[in-house]
Image: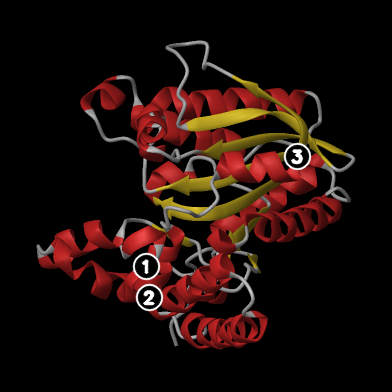
Amino acid sequence: MAAEGWLDFERPIADVEEEIEELQAIGGFADQIAQLRAKSDKLKQKIYANLTPWQQVLLARHPRRPHTTDHIERITQDFVELHGDRVFGDDPAVIAGIGRIGSLNLAIVGEEKGRDTRDRIKRNFGMPHPEGYRKALRIMQTAARFNLPILTLVDTNGAYPGVGAEERGQAEAIARNLREMSVLPVPIVVVVAGEGGSGGALAIAVGNRVLVMENAIYSVITPEGCASILWRDGSRAEEAAGVLKITSRYLLEFKIVDEVIPEPLGGAHQDWDAAAAALKEVVLRNFAELSKLSGDELIAQRIEKFRSMGVYTTA
């Protein structure tokens, strides 16, 4: 990570932006600032049009990338967060509640990594415990009883693998969510908003439509974990990122996701409001299309969607 929140490959852009800030602080250099802005835009077009898979991983993990709480704040009205799994406790790594997007009332479930150090520790860096998944399921089942559609926002590098989580049934909680989400008779739209890792992501990602933000990633394992398993060398994560095919382009090509949500030039961290506006538009459109299906049709479509993933034929 470069200084001041810029990634290493973004350094040329950062240098120009710093020049712009210096001239703005002095004042009276409108022509020079306009020239520098044009230069910055050209650099952005060049750099972000040719990102490697590893660079997209870094963007998905960018410290200034908007999180679930940031998206909820921008796209919803009257959001009421609900807490607890009614079994063990509340898990701050999972946010769940009822809200409204425009005129659409719905349930929202998302994973939250946290912003500063204190918040990240509170949120367990976005790695849910089993009670987080049980809370998510409780809210989704409640939504189904009241015929409310469900939006989930995926952003985790995986479920928490600690001893306590395993003792409280981490694998069972994930498996139960997969089973129960598949048969909820309401529309479910999933958005991979940042990092979608392993079963920790899939536990809230069984939907009728699975969308991915342009610079988000979605994979069975992190590049670091993959490199450690395949080559016994976690430092080869950059190479693993290319092998895994985890970026939005490949996810759409392999029909793992249904649509890519465009981000502002340079990534969602460049303009949270614009990123949220694009997210809102695509989500509402997908819910409008799904609203035409009956409960039985929604269930059948969802099951068939996931059954068809990975199907192949031999000549």
Residue at mark 3: 76
Which circle, 1 or 3, is nearer the viewer?
Answer: 1
Residue 42 in the image: x percent, y percent? 56, 88
Marks 1 and 3, how far apart at CA: 30 Å
Residue type, label 2: Arg
Residue at mark 2: 11
Q: Secondary structure at mark 2?
A: helix
Residue type, label 1: Leu
Residue 295 in the image: x percent, y percent? 80, 40
Marks 2 and 3, how far apart at CA: 35 Å
Marks 1 and 2, how far apart at CA: 7 Å
The answer to the question of whether label 2 and label 3 lie on touching residues, with beta carbons closer than 8 A, is no
Seen in the image, is 4 located left or right of residue 269? Answer: left
Q: Is residue 90 above or below residue 37?
A: above
Mark 2, Cα crowd under 10 Å, few <14 / some 14-19 / many 20+, is some
Number of on-image labels: 3
Residue name at image x 66 percent, y 50 percent: 302
Query: What's the mark number on residue 7?
Result: 1
Where residue 192 sits, quadrant-wise, is bottom right
Residue 26 in the image: x percent, y percent? 55, 69
The answer to the question of whether label 1 and label 3 lie on touching residues, with beta carbons closer than 8 A, is no
Q: Is residue 85 above or below residue 17?
A: above
Q: Nearer the viewer, residue 52 or 65?
A: 65
Which circle, 1 or 2, is nearer the viewer?
Answer: 2
Residue 300 in the image: x percent, y percent? 70, 49
Task: Residue 205: tell me if it is visible.
Answer: no
Q: Secondary structure at mark 3?
A: loop
Q: Is residue 81 above or below residue 313?
A: above
